[in-house]
Amino acid sequence: MPINLSKGQKVDLTKGNPGLKNIMVGLGWDVNAFDSGSDFDLDAAAFMLGENGKCPTEKEFVFYGNLAHPSEAVKHMGDNLTGEGDGDDEQIEVDLSKIPANISKIAFTVTIYDAEVRRQNFGQVSNAFIRIVDEATNTELIRYDLGEDFSIETAVVVGELYRHNGEWKFNAIGSGFQGGLAALCGHYGIEVA
């Protein structure tokens, strides 16, 4: 049984699973399509952060425009343009053994593509979740359902993997941002053209 987290909860990932190496981070959501008439295109991304909470370079921002980090520690499995169907809408694979030493945290985010133009926000999104699966055994280890506490936000930091005393932990964040992907990039030290 996976551990179901609530907002702000932290849990050990590698301590209880000492051989854990390859994990799949699945993100999913449903949208209330009648709200705006346009398709919703939600995008998952991973920001690989140093001790200062910023990406060392643009390569540490893994998203639909940069599907893999050079270390191959983090790989985005591709953009899903509609979010239709059950289960994960987008997946990011993480190889814990390949994460560079200068990276202490990986933040997983979801943003709404073209939200301003399409007049969309997370108030129109339901059943959003993040889950972490051990790829070796296909076992779901952690699941965090975000609940319905967003209204005007266009970006959400869903959760973070972080290094603590040589072990990896997961923190269920669930905090919203206005300003979409650009706001997140600014927050994590990535310059947006």
Image (cartoon, rainbow, N blue to C red):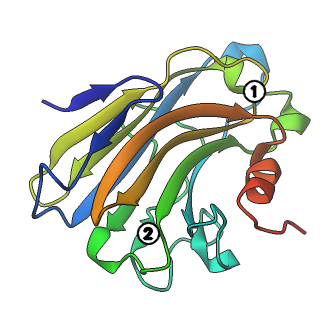
Asked which quadrant contains residue 116, the reply is: top right
Instruction: Give the structural element (helix, strand or loop) at label 2.
Output: strand
Q: Nearer the viewer, residue 61 or 31?
A: 61
Query: Compared with residue 73, is residue 23 higher up or lower down, i.e. above or below?
Result: above
Q: Is residue 97 left or right of residue 88?
A: left
Instruction: Give the structural element (helix, strand or loop) at label 1.
Output: loop
According to the image, label 1 marks what residue? 121
Q: Residues within 10 Å of mark 2 (few under 14, many from 20)?
A: many
According to the image, label 2 marks what residue? 75
**Residue type for callout 2:** Lys
Q: Is residue 95 left or right of residue 109?
A: left
Whether residue 80 can be seen here: no
Query: Compared with residue 122, is residue 102 higher up or lower down, i.e. above or below?
Result: below
Residue at 42%, 31% (x, y): give it. Answer: 85
Residue at 73%, 51% (x, y): give it. Answer: 184
What is the distance, in whole Å, between disc 2 and disc 1 at their CAs?
A: 26 Å
Q: Is residue 110 left or right of residue 101?
A: right
Q: Position of residue 177 (x, y in %)?
A: 75, 36
Query: Compared with residue 153, is residue 185 higher up or lower down, i.e. above or below?
Result: below
Q: Residues within 10 Å of mark 1 (few under 14, many from 20)?
A: many
Residue at 53%, 37% (x, y): give it. Answer: 83
Q: Nearer the viewer, residue 78 or 92?
A: 92
